[in-house]
Amino acid sequence: MDEELKKLKQIDLVNYAIAQGYVIRKDKSVEKSIFLEKNGDKIVVNKIKNIYFSVVNTNDNGNIISFIQKRKGLNLGEIRKELRPYLTIFFSPTSPKKFESKKKSVFLPPPFVKDNLKFVINYLVNERKIDFDLLNRLTLKGMLYADNKCNCVFLMVNKNGIVGAELRGIFGGEFRGLAKGSSRDDGFFQISGTGSYVLVESAIDALSYKQIFNTDMHIISTAGVRFNPPYIDILLEKREVICAYDNDKKGKEAFKALITNYPSIKRHEPIKKDWNEMLTLGLVGEKK
């Protein structure tokens, strides 16, 4: 088996299914077996072996390659093309021994509600001034969607799968928080790139930073200010790390705490409070 195909087969099947519109049935799922359904198609995924079987067709089972072949009728070359983007969105700069989840149960993402997606996209484009094409790439990969409360759902991942979700409301006071069961220590929302790691405070700031600078940096939302993220050592082993937290007291304090322990970390501070405020005002900071 060639190396690429081996890696493609390791892509988390639950995550891929969610990206295709499948919904987890929490009432029928347990820690290692996840029940998902979509338009009458019902499957159970073994999280340990990363294989599935169909509840309605005993001949429908196997790995992620079989799953796609039976549902989309693609050949192997087409399946490779289909899966390649998921090699980057489930990237994790960690080694299992240094950065393992302490959770005993699998995180179950908020329900995906297709009819609410148009409201979420409208909010992000018109209120937050985020480019539609950038949002569309995330929705196609299943990393951004709308839940049953019309929240923006930004999935937090590591190489083993989904570990949480940042939530942002679009009405009234614009609720902001994490989905129940999320772990900020085990993963993060990210926009993959080949350049330096850039730490920002939210998924919306990550999108704003990407759009302002049109950068190929690897932008990570730490879902709030983190004075010492548990994965910071791993990041520094691989690339330069830039702290791009908000231009406020907490953001400044976090940077001071980080450089106390990690002097090589650099600071990139927005000229307004945060990167989305800069984007909505049409301002561009110094180029990176």
Image (spheres, rainbow, N blue to C red):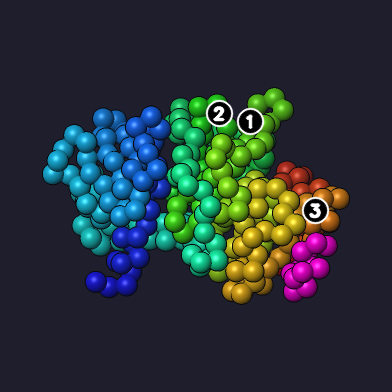
Residue 38, located in which quarter of the rendered image? Answer: top left
Which x, y percent locates residue 53?
23, 44
Q: Quick one: label 3 or label 2, which is nearer the N terminus? A: 2
Q: Earlier in the sequence, mark 2 or mark 1?
A: 2
Q: Please say if the residues under marks 2 and 1 sit with CB atoms less than 8 Å apart.
A: yes
- Let me know if residue 70 appears in the view: no
The residue at the far left in this view is: 59
Q: Please tell me which residue lies in front, 282 or 226.
A: 226
Residue 129 drawn above or below residue 209:
above
193 part of magenta stretch: no
Question: Which sits in the foreground, 144 or 49?
Answer: 49
* Residue topped by disc 2: 150
Q: Can you identify the residue that label 1 sits on?
A: 170
Q: Which residues are magenta?
A: 256-267
Separation of residues labelled 3 and 2 (CA atoms): 29 Å
Binning the other alpha carbons within 10 Å of mark 2 as few (below 14), some (14 to 19) or many (20 upward) gives: many
